[in-house]
Image (cartoon, rainbow, N blue to C red):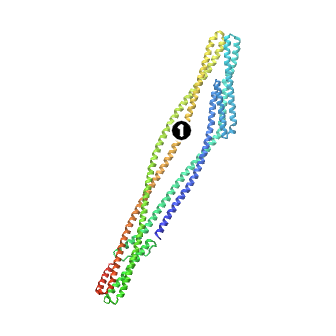
Amino acid sequence: MKISTKLFIGFLFIFLGLAGISYNLSVNTKLFAEKGDEINQNVETLKQISNESIEVKKIQDSLIKLFASANEFIYIENKEEKNRLIKKLKKNIDNVYKVSDSLGLKGTLDLVIKSLRKNVDVLIEKKEKELEIRNEIFLLNEELKKVINDGNINKSKELINILEEKNKEFMKILGEEKYTYLGKVAISMDSVYNSLAPYVDKKNKENSWTIDNVKSISEGNVELIKSVAIRNRVYIIVIVLFSILVFIILVRSIAKPLKNLTTVGKKLSDLDLTVVFPKKIEKNETGVLTLSFKTMVDTLKETIAEIKEVSKNVKHQSGNISDSALKTAATTEELSATINNISDSVSVSFNNLHEVDNKVKAISENAQGMLSLVDNISTNNSLVLEETLSEKKNLLKTLEKISLIGEDIKNSAKEINILKELSSEIHVFINKIYKVTEQTNMLALNAAIEASRAGEAGKGFAVVAEEIRKLANTSRETAEDIEGKINHITEKIDETVNISNQNVEKLSETNEEVNSVSSTIEKIVSSFETLINDLNDIHLGISNQTEDLRQLLNNSNEITNSFEEINTRVKEIDDAVMSTSEVINTLGEGATELTETSNHLDNMLHRFKQ
C-alpha cells in the first residue's frame, strides 16, 4: 500500500472520530436545551405559586390590620378619629374581598367575609351609639352646671336622674357589648383563616412537589453532564492514541525501508555487490526505490561479469587484435551502453531518494508545526488556569463579606425585635392610662352629681370635679397621641424586620449560589490541570518523533552522498571504457598497450566484491 494511501486512511479515521465527537456534542446540546426548558416551566410554576402565596399573605396582613383597627376603634372618643378608623376597617375588608376574588376564592370566602363585614358594621354601630351617649352625657353635664348655677334644684334632680340612666346605658355598652362584638370580629377572622387553610396547604404541597421536581431534574442534569464529559474524554483519548498509532505506523513504513536502503548504499559505496534484498517488496514509494536499487545491483553484477569475460578474452587474444578489432569495438560499444544504463538507473534511484528526502522534510516540518501548536495551546490553558484561580480567590473573599453582612443584619433584627417588645409594653401601659382616665372621668361625673345634690355646699367640690374631668380628658388625649406615635413606630419596626428577614434570605441564597460557582470553578481547574498534563505528554511524544525524523533525514542525506559517489564511479568506468574504445580504434599503439589496459581493467574490477 502506498504511503499516501496510508496517510489518507489515517486522517480519514481521525476525521470520522472528530465528526463523531461533534455529533455527540450537538445531541448533548439539544438534550441540555430540552432539560433547560423543563426547568424554566417549573420555575414559572414556582413564580405563580409564589405570587399566590404573596396574595394570601396580603389577606392575612389585611386581617391583622383589621383586628388592630377594631381593637383601637373600641377606645376612641374623638369623632374625626372614629371616621378615620371606620374607613380603615372598611378598606381592610375590601382588600380581603378583592384578593380572595383574584385568587378564585370568592365562593369559598364569601360567607365568612360577609359575616366579618356584618360584625364590623355592628361594632361600628355600637361605637357610634357609645359616642352618641357620651356626647349626650357631656351636654347633660353642661346643662346641669347651668341649672346648678341658676339654683334650680328640681331641674337639677331631673337632669341627675337622666344622667344616671345614660350612665347605666353607657356603662353597659362600654363594659359588655363592644367587647362582645370585638370577639365576634375575632371569631369571623378565625373563620377566614380556617377557610384559607386548605388552600394554603394545597399550594404548599404544589410548591414542595415543584421544588422536588426541579431538584430531581437538576441532579439528573449533573449526572448527564458528568457522563457526557467522561464520554468526550474517552473519545479524545481514543483519537489521540489512534493518531499516534497512525503516525508510528507511517514512520515505520518509511524508516525501516530507508534503513535497509542506507545499508545497501553503504555497501555500494564500498563497491560491495553482495547485497541481499528482501524477497517481498512493498508496492509503495520506498518499494519502488528498493526495486531500483536491486535492479541497479543486478545490472552492475552482470556488467562486471561481462567486463571480466571481455578482459579475459583480451588477454588471450591480444595477439589477434587486428582480427578481432571489429568484434572488440562492438563489445566496447555494448559495454558503454550498459554503463550508460547503469548511470541512468543510478540517476533514477538518486531522484527517487531525493523525493523521499523531500517527503521526510515535509513530515518533519508538519511535526514541528504540531509541536508549536501544542505549545501555544498549553500556554493559553495555563493562562486561563491562572485567571480561574484568581477569580476563585475573589469569589471566596466575596463569600466572606456576604457572611459578615448577613451576621450584621441578623444582629440588627434582634435589636429591632427588642425595640418592638418595648413598644408592646408601652401599649400595655397606655391601656392602663385609658382605664385610669375612664375611671377618673366617671369619678368626676359622680362627684359632679353628688356636688349638685349638695347644693350650695357642693359648688366648690363641683369645680374640683370639673377640673379632674378636664385633667382626665387631657390625659386621655395625651395617651391617644402617644399610642398613635407608638403604632406608627411599631409599623416601621415591622417593615424593618420584614426587610431584614428578606435580606437575610437573599444573602443566604446568594451564599449558596456563590458556593455552587466555587464548586464549579474547582471542577474547571481540575479539568484544566488534566488537560495541561495531557498536552505535555503529547508535546514530549511529538518531540521524540521529530528527533527520529531528523535522524532519518540525516541518514537520507548520507545515502544521497553515497549515490553521488556511485555516480562518479560509474562515470569513471564510462571514461575508462571510452579510453579502451580509443585504444582499440588506435590499433597502432600495439598489443602491449592493449595488454596493459586489460590488466588495468582487471584491477578495477577486482575492487568490486561479489
In the rendered view, would you say 592 is above or below 435?
below
Query: Which of the 4 image quadrants contains residue 258?
Result: bottom left
**Location of residue 161 by image quarter:** top right
Which kind of residue does numbered mark 1 sit on?
Asn
Q: Is 517 rendered above or below residue 234?
A: above
Decide which of 178, 137 is in the foreground and name it.
137
On the rendered structure, is 64 left or right of 283? Answer: right
Q: Find residue 465 and report its image quarter.
A: top right
Residue 74 seen in the figure: no
Which image quadrant: the C terminus? bottom left
Q: How many marks?
A: 1
> Measuring 50% from the left and 64% from the top, which residue is drawn there?
13
Residue 100: image location, x then y, percent = 66, 38
Of residue 351 and residue 291, the one placed in the foreground of this image is: 351
Give the farthest residue toward the top: 456
Residue drawn 46% across and 46% down? 392
Q: Secondary structure at mark 1?
A: helix
Left/right of residue 279 with respect to residue 423 in the rendered view: left
Which residue of the protein is positioned furthest toward the left in this rendering?
592
- Can residue 163 be seen from the camera position used here? yes
Give neighbour class at mark 1: few <14, some 14-19, many 20+ (Cα, 10 Å). Answer: some
**Looking at the picture, how far across and down is residue 539, in whole percent?**
42, 59
Where is mark 1, residue-wise? 503
In x, y percent, where is residue 110? Answer: 69, 37
Examine the rendered structure and indicate whether residue 606 appears above or below residue 129: below
Work out whether 492 lies above or below 141: below
